[in-house]
Each structure stands twice: as structure tokens, then as C-alpha cells.
Image (cartoon, rainbow, N blue to C red):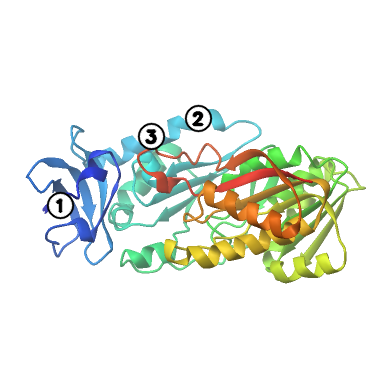
Amino acid sequence: MKIRLASGRDKPVRFGHPWIFSGAIAALPDRAGIADVFASGGELLGQGFYTPHARLAVRMLTHMGEPAFTPKTIEARIARAIDRRHGLIDEHNDSVRLVFAESDFLPGLVVDKFASTLAAQFNSAFAEAYRESITAALQNLINPERIIDTSDNEARNREGLPAIRRMNNREECLIQSGGIRFAAAIGSGQKTGFYLDQRENRAIVAGFASGKRVLDAFCYSGGFSVACLKAGAQSVTAIDSSADALALLKRNAELNAAQISPKGRLLPVEADVFTELRKQNSDGKKYDVIVLDPPKLAPSRSHAAAAEKAYKDLNLHGLHLSAEGAILATFSCSGAMTHEKLRQVLHYAAHDAGRQVQLLQPLVQANDHPVLLSFPESEYLRGYLCRVL
């Protein structure tokens, strides 16, 4: 199959970007599969997987000058992705993202290692078409106890793929991340079952927690909460709207009880986070360390304006609850919320709260979620570590 781009639409591909949208294609084929991609003048730009009727029509697999893609390429690329993460697995970490989609040159494929279990997401037509080859490669290279399909059905829907039925997996998968024991809810929890991307940020925040009052908003299974308790926090107020998430949080605290001071109090709160933060502000509560780690508030750039307002409101609540000199760790996992935009939103929130804020350092996704320079969309987790004055 051949795909020819419209005039003037080849520059991103030439610079290594892996996505081609349907509007950049001169004539759209009517079947899916591997296609040779040509510039409007006839120059071969590489190979990609074409998906009919999808706005993101082509995911590039090779670029000009690279060897042709074959099914054997899949195992070779998975093997190289695993090798690049070799140093991240040790006695403190048995869980890591092994394959990060386009950043590891396997479009739409995500593979997380949770101890001896793999969670795999087949989020593109390419990944689905080569599901058997991918699964066989993972078995051959890692030999896991099991592979659980945790595919993102929203992403699959955009590709015209059938939804996968998430398993209601209540069986614990015990893992270690950053030297902390966790029970991961693979298959029934959020994302692939645990937020591996916050591993390094949990350690950074926990470094400020000793003897402090901590607020963990959108705590989910308690990654930040448990890290802060283990670091000697006086108390951790953990807020989430999900009873299942809070049950997992309590279980994770139990798993680490031997390393948590009996004086460290865990205070779970099941509530809408925005409502609870307003209530706590009305009650005059103050905290020394605050973590704001909401789910994606801007699913696409078209929702950016509404999301900016939500992020501003969230940070405004956090600033109101901050004691003098408090540490604030604020995050966004919305692709449309750049570091610059988050910084601007935080500035506006600080102005409205009447507080001064010092930026101590930017916070990013863990290094097993690498950002490919030619694919800026792979940078999705952004945050700031701040001091509130």
C-alpha cells in the first residue's frame, strides 16, 4: 500500500514525528495495514501503519534511511526498550514501564512490569494487528507469570477498535516502587493499575514530610501518602472520591506499617476533592506539605480553557490551605497543559490567594517514561515543587 502526502505536509515526518493526520494525506486508502509513505513529490519518507476513518491516520514505523519494518522488528524493539531500563530494576524497584509507545518506537503499545506480572495496553490499530507477535515477544523475553490486558478503551475507540473488557481483579499484585511496598490493582484500577510515573516525585515530596502535616488530594492508592508516612509525617490527610481507592490506600499503609511511626496518623477522606478542599478551608485547616495530583482535566486541546479554570481553582484551594512556608507539589497529566501554562495558572492562583510562591523545581514523569524529542506529545506529566509564603 502507498500513501502520498499533500503538498507541504511532509515537514513533521521529515523531522521524525511519528503521527500523520488524515488531513495531510492526498488520497485516503480504504484498508488498514503497513503503507509506504511518500512526499507529494514522490520521495519515500518511510513506512507507517494506516488506519482508515481515524483522524490520526498513520503512525510511522520507520523513517527514511531506516531498515524496512517486519514482524521481527517488534521483538527487537521490545528487547531494546527493556535493555534501556535494565538499571532501573533492583532490590528497591521491581516494577517499571518497559515499553512507552511511540517513545520506544512501538506506536500505541504500553507495557508495564509489576513484579512478575505484565500489564499491556494495545491502544492503536498497529498494536492490535500485531497483538500475537507482541505477546509472543514478551513471553520470550521476560517469561512473566501472566499478561493482563489493561488497554485504554477510549484510545481504542478513536482507532475503531472493539473495547476490551476490564477484569474485576481483586487479587493483590504486590510490588516494590522506590523501596515502598504497594498492592497494585492491575486490570481494575486506574491506568495500568499503579502510577509508576510518579516514582521519583514521591521520593522528592517525601523528603519534606518528616514531622509535617501532609495533604494528599486525589490520593488514589496512596503513593504519596504512604511515602510521606514512611518518611515520618506527623499526619497525612488523603482525599479521594473512590471508596475502592481508599481501601487500597489503607492496605498499602498496612504493608509498610513496620516502617511507619505509630505516631504517624493516616486520615482517609472519601469525598469530592474540590468540595472537601473548600470545606477544609472554611474550617481553617492548614498543612505543611500539599500534593495536588488530579486526573486528566483536559482530555484534548479543545477542553483547555475549561481545564485551566479547574487547575486554577484546585491550586487556589491548595494555596488557601498552605501554612506559612508550606511545600506544594502540583501536577497536571493533561497534554494540553504545558509547563508554561501550568506555571501561569499557578501564578494567577497565587495572586488571587494573596500568597507569594517560590518555584523550587519542575517535576516530570519518571525516566522509564522517556520523552522523545521528535514527539513532544510523549511529555504528559508536568508539575512544580513550590514553597508557599
Helix, strand or loop at disc 2? helix
Residue ID at (27%, 56%)? 129
Query: Which dot, 1 or 2, sits closer to the camera?
Result: 1
Residue closest to the eye, 345 or 299? 345
Of label 2 and label 3, which has the lower sequence position? 3
Residue 382: x percent and y percent?
56, 47
- Residue on which disc 2 sits: 86
Using the rendered image of the protein, determine whether residue 120 is visible from the camera's viewpoint.
Answer: yes
Outermost residue to the left: 42
**Residue in the picture at 59% in, 65% down:** 309
Disc 1 and disc 3: Cα gap in Å?
32 Å
Give the amino acid at mark 1.
Answer: Leu
The residues bearing labels 1 and 2 have C-alpha atoms spaced at a distance of: 39 Å
Amino acid type for the residue under numbered disc 2: His
> Under tag 3, what secondary structure?
helix
Return the residue at label 3: 79
Q: Is residue 205 left or right of residue 1?
A: right
Left or right, residue 305 beside residue 312: left
